[in-house]
Image: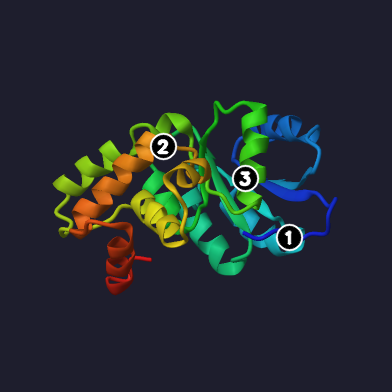
Amino acid sequence: MTPRKAEGEAIRVLLVDDHQVVRQGLRKMLDGEKGIEVVGDAGSAEEILAEVELLSPDIVLMDIRMPGMGGIEATRQLKAKQPECSIIVLTLYGEYLPQAIEAGAVGYLLKNIKREELSQAIRAVYRGQSPLDLSLSRELFAQFAALASSDGRPRGYLAAPEREILRLIASGASNREIGDRLFMSTATVKRGVRRIFDKLEVRSRSQAVAEAYKRRLI
């Protein structure tokens, strides 16, 4: 996302979590961060969808498991309603990563995140990057490889994180730049790129991008 504010204006953040103590804790973490302003909080997905236009956040921190509508569907509806708003999933659970990215989330973090890491992630998303929790990204592609080989999906299927890497390849990003944007090590990115080449049956980045456009993967 390209910053839309004049220099010096704060990044507007909205918190969504069904536990009030979590929302209070997040407020406390972010209140002292220069350039970040918590403009509101919501205890349900339905509440955020009703208030988002009024509060006009730049970034939403979204929980996954909530009574009523869950965070995945809320992310999908919120992106349809406010496409310029960026969503970071903040959850206890790592297994919803592919669904969250496919729904439109641009970041996925676990709730044991430290204060400085959270503020860094918010600023990274505002600059157009896509942070993932490091503990998830280390095993990400091994997990998706196992999933793709066992669920009957067609040959050449790319999981959501692989599509994100491919999108960055198409933009001209190097492995190091991709790693910086996705909070992955360069080695993890290299493994992901090799897997993409194998799935698309290509030998180079240019061939991968051409094949991806042909298949409408990006």
How far from the left and from the top, in percent, is residue 168?
45, 56
Question: Three-letter amino acid code at disc 3?
Answer: Ala
Which residue is pictured at 26% across the width and 46% down the height?
A: 194
Question: Three-letter amino acid code at disc 2?
Answer: Thr
How far from the left and from the top, in percent, is residue 195?
25, 47
149 lies left or right of 5: left
Which disc is residue 56 wearing? Answer: 1
Q: Is residue 37 above or below residue 111?
A: below
- Secondary structure of the residue carrying tag 1 is loop
Mark 3–mark 2 CB contact (< 8 Å): no
- Residue on which disc 2 sits: 186
Upstream in sequence: badge 3 or badge 2: 3
Question: Three-letter amino acid code at disc 1?
Answer: Ser
Q: Quadrant of residue 52?
A: bottom right
Which residue is pictured at 31% across the width and 52% down the height?
A: 159
How far from the left and from the top, in percent, is residue 93?
43, 34
